[in-house]
Image (cartoon, rainbow, N blue to C red):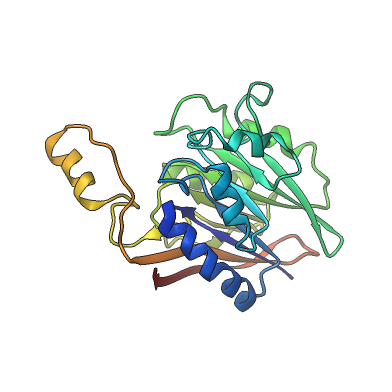
Amino acid sequence: MIKVLSIGDVFGRPGRKLCKTLIPELRSKHKADLVIVNAENASGGKGLSEKNYKEIMESGIDLITLGDHMFDQKSIKTIMENKRNPIIRPVNYPSSEMAGQGIWTTSLNSVEINVICLQGRIFMREGADNPFRAFDEIHDKLNSDSINLVEFHAEATSEKHAMFWYLDGRVSAAWGTHTHVATADERVYPQGLGAIADLGMTGPVDSVIGVDCESSIKRFTSGVYSRFKVSESERVALNGALFEIDEKTKECISVTRIREESVV
């Protein structure tokens, strides 16, 4: 059995601090073989800096994933250009014109494991190619005996659910990120895909999806744009999911939501 712990969008300093304190504990508690963290909002709520990349990696994780804020911090480009660094961005962007890669491969118990990052297109920034077709192009090149995992960074739940049905039978586990709100739809699909539409956020609890409440409310009530700032809430929560995968059948046996609150 292979256990994969996927952790939702890390938001700002509160999220980074929680990763440092909780991830080693959770990895040990759940006996996770792989820990994957979305960190595209880890630096001030937008993007991931080189400094914060190193900080999060020191939490004892295996892979960092990014989304539509992947290049909001310019310093991350240097990290992404080195293919040996365990960090991936959505693969369905023109690879010849963009730093980084969208697939990461490792091995556990002599089994090849591929993690693929995709980005949705509904209510998202323009520029991403069709994620369904992008997956097909990648899947055709993968080892047929490998365990494949997909992170789908997308806004619309309908697009995520459509993707999960599309992946069922070809992927062992898939999870959504981006909305910062954990969903309660975790399940195992008919052909063995374990999935959940959104892992949720790792960051400040008393906030509007990570942002200071007052500044967020002001934008909605006044219609005037104001710069968002990360909430300074002392209450923080880590959200994610644990996938248990049969390494022989490549099917997911269970999906368990994870939520841990703390004060930092």
Residue 46: % across, % down: 43, 41
Residue 106: % across, % down: 78, 53
Of residues 30 and 173, the one drawn nearer to the viewer in this rendering: 30
Q: Is residue 112 above or below residue 102?
A: below
Q: How many labels does the image show?
A: 0
Q: Which residue is drawn at 52% across and 40% down?
A: 67
Of residues 160 and 15, the one drawn nearer to the viewer in this rendering: 15
Residue 187: % across, % down: 53, 62
> In the picture provided, is 207 more to the left or to the right than 76?
left
Q: Among all residues in the image, which is located at the extreme top?
A: 97
Q: Among all residues in the image, which is located at the extreme bottom?
A: 29
Q: In this view, does 38 lie above or below 6?
A: above
- Is residue 20 at all visible to an observer of this figure? yes
Q: Residue at x 57, y 72 (%)?
A: 26
Q: Among all residues in the image, which is located at the extreme left?
A: 222
Quarter of the figure with the N terminus: bottom right
Of residues 189 and 62, the one drawn nearer to the viewer in this rendering: 62
Quarter of the figure with the C terminus: bottom left
Q: Is residue 234 above or below residue 119?
A: below
- Is residue 256 at all visible to an observer of this figure? no
Residue 212: % across, % down: 27, 51
Q: Which residue is drawn at 54% across and 65% down?
A: 20
Of residues 263 and 145, the one drawn nearer to the viewer in this rendering: 263
Quadrant of residue 234 in the image? bottom left
Q: Among all residues in the image, which is located at the extreme front?
A: 51
> In the picture provided, is 220 more to the left or to the right than 96?
left
Q: Residue at x 65, y 45 (%)?
A: 87
